[in-house]
Amino acid sequence: MEDLCYRTDSARIPLEVYFNHNLSDTEKNLFLTIMHYTDKGGNFTLSNEVLSELFDLSVSTFTKSFSNLQKQGFIQIEIKQGNKRFISIDRRYVLLYGPLIDNYWKNSRNEGERTARKKLRAEYDEIGHRSEKITSGAKGCIYISLFSSFPSLNNLLATQGESPSEGRAVEQESKSPENQATLKDTVNRKMKELEAKKERDRKKRMDKNPASKKAVEIMDYWKNAEGKKLVQHREGTMRYYSACKLIDTILNGKFQSEAFPKYNNYKFTVADFKTAIDRFAKAATDADYEVEAGTSFKKWLKDRPFSEFIYYPYTDNMKNKSLFIYYHENDIKLLDSRLRTVTVEDTHCFKKLSADFKDLMNMNGNELSAKQKRDISYTEEKLKAFLVKHQSNLILTEHWKNMYGCEDDVSLLGKFLIDAIKEESEGVNITSGWLCSENSMKERLPKHLKSIGLFRNYS
């Protein structure tokens, strides 16, 4: 496998990597591995442990190698989906290391090599300038997108000691189904062996140093909070065990954080955990409490596993850095009744009020936004309360309902409210918030009803 990889990749290595003296041989081989195992989404997800097995090198070697490749501008590293690492090739390296390649070509003493490189450079420039327009997800691998169309590549290989036919043979061999299957099977087998070894080591560690009963109690409390709606760590997994050990650390007064120095060595209690979990669960899952339902932040909260509830290192926002600390210190707030309104679109009043509001706003067939729909539903609720409160003073006859095509008194009040707002709308920026405002219910609507003789005893 090693010989095959060497022959395959040595014929396809990007020049910016091959001639870069800031990269070790291991880092160059690692870059080729990233190119070879990049998925269709442009991401490389093999762990350091898997690479350690494949290359027979230490895990720390790959940690340092990835760090240097990122520092030199060849790769980008992102942490997503909890703690899963995604590595992609940074396409800007083509432009970054252009001068390096130019300098090498100028100093080359091999005339055949220099001629081949000049021709390759012309093709490289043409494709390289276009590379700025290639989005990060356009191709799985930058090497394929920029170098596979170079007709001079075989000539360049010839000057390095291989004939064009040998170069083509190497490339053809690397693409053969047998070799691809061998590589894939080897990686899959190594990954399975490594996972089995990690599982055995995991069980040994957990058996040797089990989590405390208090930690398990808190994890069970998290599991059942708000009807089991929070993200769970499956019991028996390393994530679950790590979360329990984190709880034990905090319960034992060994909490240490530069971000929260006042809690260093502070002994939290089980009750502290349960209070913070209750508050967080309501904020993340209950539409009646902050944060507002339907927002991306509400969804982000709900997607946090327990470990990120305790500490989330990928943000500078102090609230989100430790949701545990935030909800330990702060109680949750009930949302304003307007924000807690559930939109109901199938009532006659909602449909009538929506149509009249669109006409008022000259929306020309455009759809209402979610906020506008919610405000209209909330207006309907407030009109019902208005009707109950002022029933004895209102004169709402069938004549008016027939005139405006309204089926009930609430819809008719909605029509009068639109008329009242229309009187003030000239030169003013009207929003859906006008419909359900306190001013509309206490001043605007009663005043309009009085002006057309439908409100008794208005003062």
Image: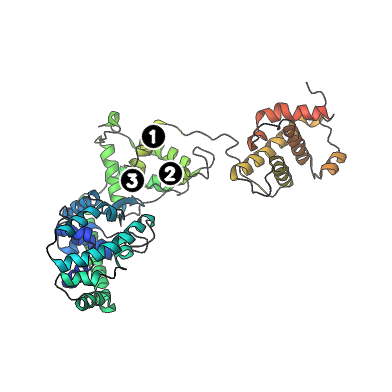
* Pointers 1 and 3 in contact (C-beta within 8 Å): no
Instruction: Name the residue beneath numbered marker 1.
Output: 326
Q: Which of the two labelled residues, at mark 1 and mark 2, occupies the earlier sequence position? A: 2
Residue 418 placement (x, y as % from top left): 73, 37
Q: SS for tag 1?
A: helix
Instruction: Name the residue beneath numbered marker 2.
Output: 301
Q: SS for tag 2?
A: helix
* Residue nearest the observer in this picture, 265 or 38: 38
Residue 228 placement (x, y as % from top left): 45, 49
Crowd tier of the residue under label 2, counting other residues whose Cα lies within 10 Å: few below 14, some 14–19, many 20 or above: many
- Residue occupying the far right of the picture: 399
Number of numbered labels in the structure image: 3
Tag 1: amino acid: Tyr
Tag 2: amino acid: Leu
Instruction: Name the residue beneath numbered marker 3.
Output: 307
* Pointers 1 and 2 in contact (C-beta within 8 Å): no
**Which numbered disc covers residue 65?**
none
Q: CA distance from mark 1 to mark 2?
A: 13 Å
